[in-house]
Amino acid sequence: MEPVAGTPSHWHLALHGGALVELWADGYGVEGGTYVFSSLVRATAEEQEQVEVVARTPADDRRVLVAVARVPEAVVQDVHSAAEPARDGTCACRPFSWEE
């Protein structure tokens, strides 16, 4: 399996409990009350059997969007690209630390 869209984007998910989730994906959508983050990859049929394929490209059956994370919408306070500010214009996100 290999990425098709280059380096995935860096996303911040601020959770209602105060935690910050950082993940890398090409994009996301909301499906049934859940944020679904996905990445565009080129994968063989065998590789596709090992992951959750959320969409397929019509021109090439090896190019698929695979789910990289599912997060319930109810636990998320804010979602934004790490390169862009949060909805309120600020990014109160803190860097990850194993010491916390």
Image: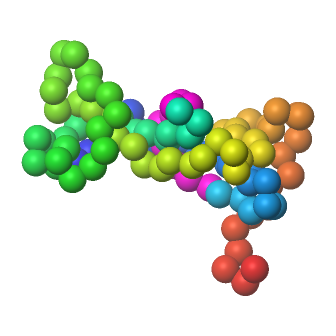
Residue found 62% across the figure and 55% down from its top: 22
Q: Magenta region: which residues? A: 22-31
Residue sitting at 17 percent across and 47 percent down? 49
What is the x, y in percent for residue 54? Answer: 34, 34
**Residue 69 visible in image:** yes
Residue 4 in view here: no
Count the numbered circles shown: 0
Q: Name above or below for residue 100 compared with residue 72.
A: below
Q: Is residue 64 above or below residue 96?
A: above
Residue 28 included in the magenta stretch of the image: yes
In this rendering, position of residue 38 left or right of residue 99: left
Picture coordinates of residue 33, whole percent (x, y): 59, 36
- Does the stretch in magenta take in 36? no
Residue drawn at x 81%, y 61% is 18
Front-most of 51 and 33?
33
Q: Along the horizontal axis of the image, is 92 left or right of 3?
A: right
* In the image, residue 95 above or below residue 98: above
Expressed as whole percent of the image width and height from the top left, the position of residue 93 reads 80, 55
Left/right placement of residue 40 relative to residue 15 reads left
Q: Residue furthest bottom?
A: 99
Q: Position of residue 55 (x, y in %)?
A: 32, 28
**Residue shown at 26% from the left, 21% from the top:** 57
